Image: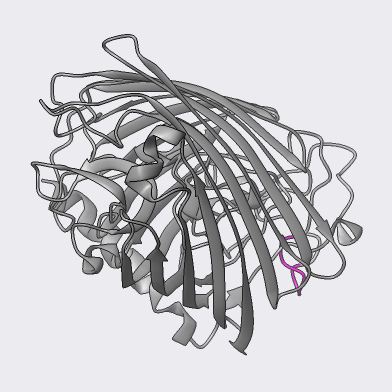
Amino acid sequence: MADRIFAPLAGASLLALALPAAAQYHTHHPVPPAQAQPAAATPATPAVDPHAGHGPGQAAPTPQATPSGHQAHDMTGGADAGHVMTSALGPWPMTRDASGTSWQPDLSEHGGVHTTRGDWSFMGHVLLNLTHDWQNGPRGDDKTFASGMIMGSARRDFADGSTLNLRTMLSPDPLMGKEGFPLLLAAGETADGVTPLIDRQHPHELVMELSASYARPLTGKDSVFAYIGLPGEPAFGPPAFMHRMSAMDSPEAPITHHWLDSTHIVFGVATLGWVHEAFRLEASSFRGREPDEDRYDIESPELDSWAVRASWNPSPEWSLQASYADVTAPEQLEPDEDETKWSASAIHARRFGAQGWWSSTLAWGRKTNDHDESKDGWLLETAVSPDDRWTLFARAERIETDELLPAAAGGHGELFTVAKASLGAVHDWRLAENVRFGVGALYSVNRVPDVLEPTYGGDPDGGIVFLRLKID
């Protein structure tokens, strides 16, 4: 059944990924605020922009003014200047869309290769990293692996203002093997179905998203949408780390991943949302169990968990969210233990100069299990790009975890507070209008309590060097 439903989506998305070779294509990036177009004095009838799509987000009809009353920023910078590409989920700027149905600031960066075929518009985007990672200390390791994402979408706009959007995202992560890559202080999931992965980041699924969404305006200020995915992302947390503007240039996963956004891949999710100007409320039903160690399969959807999220973009520079999730048996190794999760985050973005941008995220998450044991995680990350050649990025994290020294009889062990900080940079060379090649590196240091120093050899450090290819 799933094959019959998603085969057209996969075919459409594969077509989108071939778009860079098409004879007619367009690339869109936001322009600095100085070039922003003023909002219309009165609500305008949306004009459909045929060039749609976004890796983390989507494109949509093109109104001259957004319902939030913010200035409508030009997302084309070319012949279509003065038009705003808007989301497939509602009448807001396309750059607000991130992973799943999550929001980021309107001034965030957007990229994608776009084309149209009849009533449909298509988008393709590629980000691939070849990474060598080494982590020092007795529990460290080194590994060379590939990671990243290949995304595509197909979209159709209707005369009544509603929008249908189909999206897929694939990852080369399974090629690195079931044990993933070294990441000190990280824990979660399993490689063999028997023992947990500790001090390693698990690989993502080959199919990270197969989703469909439908949005419809109700009034000049209100709209509703529905989103389904197998897999997909429910309404919890900030955007997933590989889609956050403050994190997407770093090939290193955050150790707060399982506090903030580990639900970004679930096999079965259905979300309904209502939007009033710059405020949105959405609720999801989804499968709580995290994907198993077979990274190539499509698992059966069982909607046994739920989440709610409130999002607010008070200005083009800010995006705020608070969310709650009740998750049934998320861990394969602990099938009888449920979990509740809270999350709150603030994302800020600004643009400067001709191409410069700066984005930062502050996020908090809390996990509570059936034994009323709560564990908090904090994250602060930032990235700045003065032009299209250089990007600098940094991250600081602090988590409370009981998975680093599992109890002898199984389950979790003693609770520790640990921290990690990293700093890195990447330099890009533009090979073609839509293609960039980059070389980057980062250095990280970990902080553990005294009782863990003999296990980790003090406060161990590590590093990553990487090559990357971007088609956007």
Q: Residue at x 25, y 67 (%)?
A: 176
Instruction: Give the camera-side residue of 411 and 382.
Output: 411
Q: Residue at x 69, y 46 (%)?
A: 360
Residue 26 visible in the picture:
yes
Q: Residue at x 49, y 27 (%)?
A: 365
Instruction: Give the camera-side residue of 460 and 266.
Output: 460
Up-down relation of residue 370 to residue 465 (above or below)? above
Instruction: Give the camera-side residue of 404 and 36.
Output: 404
Image quarter for residue 427? Answer: bottom right
Residue 445: percent from left, percent from top: 53, 53
Instruction: Give the camera-side residue of 8 and 366.
Output: 366
Q: Is residue 98 left or right of residue 456?
A: right
Q: Residue at x 77, y 70 (%)?
A: 77
Up-down relation of residue 72 to residue 272 (above or below)? below
Tell me the magenta residue range: 75-80
Q: Is residue 395 left or right of residue 328?
A: right
Up-down relation of residue 344 to residue 181 (above or below)? above
Residue 429: percent from left, percent from top: 63, 86
Residue 67: percent from left, percent from top: 73, 34
Examine the structure image and report whether residue 136 is included in the region drawn in magenta: no
Q: Is residue 321 left or right of residue 240?
A: right
Residue 294: percent from left, percent from top: 13, 53
Residue 57 visible in the picture:
no
> Of helix, strand and loop, which mostly describes the magenta segment?
loop
Q: Is residue 172 left or right of residue 46?
A: left
